[in-house]
Image (cartoon, helix red, strand yellow):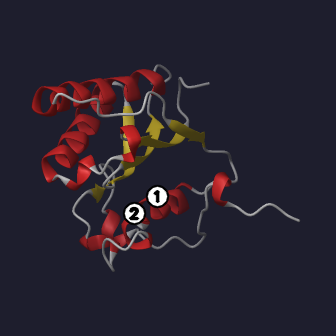
Amino acid sequence: MYVGQSWYFVTMCSVGRRRVFANSCNAIDVVEAVRKHSIAHWFAVHAYCVMPDHFHGLFSGMEPASDLLAFVKNIKKTTSCAYRVRRGETLWQKKFYDHILKARDNPAGVAAYIWMNPVRKGLCSDARDYPFSGSFTLDWKTAIAPAEPWTPAWKKKMPA
């Protein structure tokens, strides 16, 4: 289920939702770990955003052996070790949230949802100005407005 050529929306949160990534050094560490481990684990990183207390990513496995659990584990391990050395504290919550995209999920809409997170949270007025968002596969600043917006299942209102 987590191995192969699928699309994944991933959210990782800091312990206690502390705003550790408001520190640019910590945010940059996450981006660089994602870059390094995406190559090692054969994942394309279509969208990412490091928020003050969490990280969102849209990944797609590029090979039958692409293993999402190993990929995320290595990102968290690399960044946790560096953070523990600097601060002596735990960085990440133990688990992470994932959504395996279905055929009805538009990856461009998921990517836009990720990039628009800083705007929704009032950190900037234009997502293209946020320094800790991006893509390793495309010019994201021209691809930010999808034809079909996406909303995560946990944010959708249930019918009465």
* Label 1 crowd (10 A; few <14 / some 14-19 / many >=20): many
- Tell me the number on the disc at residue 115: 2
Structural distance between the alpha carbons of marks 2 and 1: 6 Å
- Secondary element at image label 2: helix
For the N terminus, the quadrant is top right
Label 2 crowd (10 A; few <14 / some 14-19 / many >=20)? many
Along the horizontal axis of the image, is 47 left or right of 139? Answer: right
Q: Give the labeled residue for mark 1.
A: 111
> Where does residue 36 sit, x and y in percent of width and height?
23, 32
Front residue of this view, candidates 145 and 94: 94
Q: How many marks?
A: 2
Residue 67 makes an appearance in the image: no
The residue that appears at 23% across and 55% down in the rendered structure is 22
Q: Which mark is residue 33?
A: none
Q: Amino acid at mark 1?
A: Ala
Image: 60 above or below 151: above
Q: Quadrant of residue 89?
A: top left
Outermost residue toward the bottom in this view? 125
Tag 1's secondary structure? helix
Give yes or no for contact between labels 2 and 1 (Cβ–Cβ under 8 Å): yes
Q: Tell me the quarter of the picture where residue 118 sits.
A: bottom left
Q: Which of 38/153 is in front?
A: 153
Residue 113, image x, y percentages = 49, 62
Left or right, 130 with reference to 16: left
- Asked if 159 appears above or below 135 in the picture, the reply is below
Location of the C terminus (image quadrant): bottom right
Give the residue drawn at x 44%, y 33%. Answer: 62
x%, y% of residue 6? Answer: 55, 35
**Residue at screen point 15% across, 53% down:** 24
**Which residue is at 24% across, 44% downward?**
31
